[in-house]
Amino acid sequence: MAEVSSSLLEQLKSCIVWSWTYLWTLWFFLMLFLVYILRVPLKINDNLSTVSMFLNTLTPKFYVALTGTSSLISGLILIFEWWYFRKYGTSFIEQVSVSHLRPLLGGVDNTAPSNSTSNNGDTDSNRQSVSECKVWRNPLNLFRGAEYNRYTWVTGREPLTYYDMNLSAQDHQTFFTCETDHLRPADAIMQKAWRERNPQARISAAHEALELNECATAYILLAEEEATTIVEAERLFKQALKAGEVCYRRSQQLQHHGAQYEAQHRRDTNVLVYIKRRLAMCSRKLGRTREAVKMMRDLMKEFPLLSMFNIHENLLEALLELQAYADVQAVLAKYDDISLPKSATICYTAALLKARAVSDKFSPEAASRRGLSTAEMNAVEAIHRAVEFNPHVPKYLLEMKSLILPPEHILKRGDSEAIAYAFFHLQHWKRVEGALNLLHCTWEGTFRMIPYPLEKGHLFYPYPICTETADRELLPFSVYPKKELPFFILFTAGLCSFTAMLALLTHQFPELMGVFAKAFLSTLFAPLNFVMEKVESILPSSLWHQLTRI
């Protein structure tokens, strides 16, 4: 019985919500008609005359007090809204409407599980990202000496934040060092070099290590930080490859002799994979894209378990440069899987491929007349999926925001990931005819499906609140995009300013403001008076008496 009663209540609530959603205009006109019919017994005309006489007797001081009080209240609301926004990153009025009013008006309960989320959401790694924002190594990060330092030479500004470079130092110590480094003099020197904050001290230590032995990690450091061109960096990486392969083969034979040998082999594997990946990136930057693709494929076949480097994202970018869209689709079929973590590269590349099938003939006017075809609907859904994952990317692809050099680390679903993606993939979107036009026409439709992305997602988990704070650590403050103010802050600011201006004008020019107020009210009620006269001319004046007789 309890289940039956609850279901009846839910049905009744849904019917009421439906009626208010679609029949509110009919309800409104019915209420107006009812008020008109009952104007005689309710003495509406007499009450209106009394109110008008009372308003005519009020002095200008009353209007000054009224507008001044309104300005004070709206100012207090503005101050509270601004404080709440600065502390929690959202509007208090919007938060209350989402938490309390929206469920009463038929909104979806935020605590209820979503089927689409469970079917199409990310894995457990994305669940953890809700509570803590995990920073990832940028798979397409630039070379410090050949690219980042060039920006510093030209502008005199640092393109990387201290937090970003500190994360890179931690990565280098994790990937390129092990517990047995103190047994080899060259590796012991490099172990200290990766901890140095001064770039010149790191470079000097790398040269010192090379004087003792052919050290692969020393060549890596010089290629990353001392080489001023990609050609020079490639030459150093090739030398690092020779030294790294020797160490890898030696440790491979000894890896089962103990835990120390196993740790050393793991370090040598990381070094070898890093060198080969950077060599492939050098080939890509020097225009030898097919060679780069071959090197990346061979590397992924040789070390299929090392997914931490995200080499498939480098491969996707190189294949898009070759316009090998069938190969891109094959890579996406393997990595755009529900069991694997997503990225902006995965989601937006999938959207680009689906947009490519329809973008050259897409027209928003024609689509609004005839509706979307199946292929166009698939493309739009792919764009919505990508925008839900990272909503910052479209403004960079559409060049509504200025691009900067991407950081060495990114925050998935954050602004740093959007910059890193658009920096390398904007050219691929421009190459597909009509793709940016389709993106421009459809990307904002995502927020109609998820109007409150911080509380509830559609295909992914809700957008993490902590991304802005983490992104501020990764991106230079001088160019970090400012967050748009909520509507209610702007509204209360305008209301406070408007009422304060009315109070001041009423105090200074009471008679003139009275004339303006009467003219405004007469103009405002002129259409209503016109309608009332037309209705009285059509309906008989004794309609109420006839209805009472019936």
Image (spheres, rainbow, N blue to C red):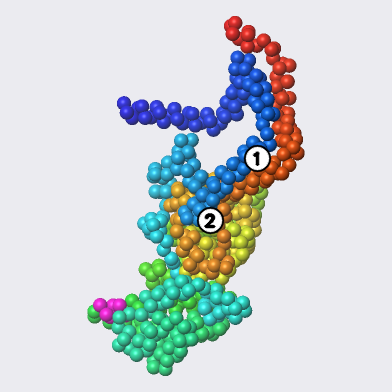
Q: Circle 1 — which element?
A: helix
Element under label 2?
A: loop
Residue at 64% from the left image edge and 43% from the top image edge: 499
Q: CA distance from mark 2 to mark 1?
A: 46 Å
- Going by the numbered disc 2, the residue's amino acid type is Pro
Inspect the magenta stretch and tell me whether residue 29 lies in it: no
Question: At which x and y percent is residue 456?
Answer: 45, 48
Magenta span: helix, strand or loop, mainly?
helix
Is residue 273 placed above or below 510 in the rendered structure? below
Chain part drawn in magenta = 259-264
Residue nearer the viewer, 224 or 72:
72
Circle 1: residue type: Val
> In screen coordinates, is 364 left or right of 511?
left
- First in sequence: mark 2 vs mark 1: 1
Residue tagged by mark 2? 391
Between residue 505 and residue 394, name the one nearer to us: 505
Please tell me which residue is depicted at 56% across the width and 83% down the height of the picture: 228
Say if residue 379 shows up in the picture.
no
Residue found at the very far top of the displayed protein: 549
User: Residue at the location (75% across, 35% down)?
Assistant: 515
* Residue, disc 1: 64
| Residue 76 sits above or below residue 43 on the image | below
Q: Is residue 130 above or below residue 510?
A: below
Q: Quadrant of the N terminus?
A: top left
The quadrant holding residue 53 is top right
Q: Residue at x 40, y 87 (%)?
A: 215
